[in-house]
Image (tube, grey):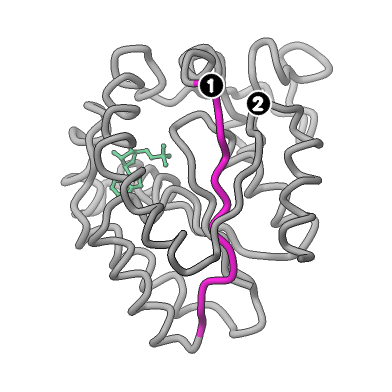
Amino acid sequence: MNIILLGPPGAGKGTQSAGLVERHGMRQLSTGDMLRAAVKAGTPVGLKAKAVMERGELVSDEIVSALIDDELASMGPETGAIFDGYPRTAAQADALDAILAKNGRALDHVIELEVNEDALVERITGRFSCGNCGALYHDTANPPSEPGKCDACGSSDFRRRPDDNEETVRTRMAEYRAKTAPILPGYEARGIVSRVDGMGAIDAVANAIDGILAS
Ligand code: AMP
């Protein structure tokens, strides 16, 4: 199974990917996570990407497609792939088709998480994660059950992304509208697009996604 989770920043792609990994043993391929790891490690890719990410603009197609190419090559054919935050441009969508074909894979579903854009800024500026295990939280929608302590690992080392501020979020949304939304019609023509109401509770969205995967 190879699926793309599509939706603007804050739509819940990362949260839903984590659920799919847990429920179905799929692998999440998040170019955002890969780039953040590269920035943290100070690799040449990280050095190139850092300022672009801080502005909320898109990193070059070549860089992100190479990251996906490498990651997919390291996966056994039986492991399903969730593309999270990739592709984001028409050139990346074309690159993904070529990378999948090279690995004997094909896209099964493109799932668009539909969200009310007014809610996104609040969703994004309230989110944080565990710096130790990566568990995702939100100030109001999904706080840890014990304040200041990660439910999953007990750590109190929480992090906020530097690009999760209102100004950068507005740029990221504009990038989504201008460059990412236009790739949907191509997938629609292939009959593989499904839409899910991304404003629902995390479990309700997960159930809707599982229904699509089972169809
Ligand atoms: P995300 O974690 O998916 O919200 O991505 C965070 C940032 O990383 C984005 O705002 C971009 O600067 C960069 N990025 C992540 N994925 C891509 C991609 N597929 N193409 C270009 N830039 C990306």
Label 1 is placed on what type of residue? Asn
Quadrant hosting residue 201: top right
Judge from the rendering whether residue 121 lies leftward or rightward of residue 203; answer left or right. Answer: left
Please, is residue 153 above or below residue 127 in the view?
Answer: below
State the residue at coordinates (25%, 53%): 43
Please, is residue 125 above or below residue 101 in the view?
Answer: above
Number of numbered discs: 2
Q: Is mark 2 within 8 Å of ligand 1?
A: no
Distance between the Cα atoms at labels 1 and 2? 7 Å
Residue 16, how many percent across, how many down? 66, 44
Question: Could you tell me which secondary element the residue under label 1 belongs to?
Answer: loop
Residue closer to the observer: 74 or 187: 187
Judge from the rendering whether residue 13 lies leftward or rightward of residue 20; answer left or right. Answer: left
State the residue at coordinates (80%, 56%): 23
- Was residue 38 drawn as part of the magenta stretch in this picture? no
First in sequence: mark 1 vs mark 2: 1
- Using a 10 Å C-alpha cutoff, classify the residue at mark 1 as few (fewer than 14 neighbours), some (14 to 19) or many (20 or more): few
Quadrant where the N terminus is found in the figure:
bottom right
Q: Which residue is mark 2?
A: 199
Q: Which residue is mark 1?
A: 116
Ligand number 1: quarter of image: top left
Residue 179, how many percent across, how many down? 26, 43
Label 2 is placed on what type of residue? Met
Residue closer to the observer: 190 or 18: 190
Query: From which residue to which does the magenta span run?
Result: 105-116
Quadrant where the C terminus is found in the figure:
bottom right
State the residue at coordinates (43%, 65%): 189
Quadrant hosting residue 153: top right
Q: Are marks 1 and 2 in contact (CB under 8 Å)?
A: yes
Question: Could you tell me which secondary element the residue under label 2 belongs to?
Answer: loop
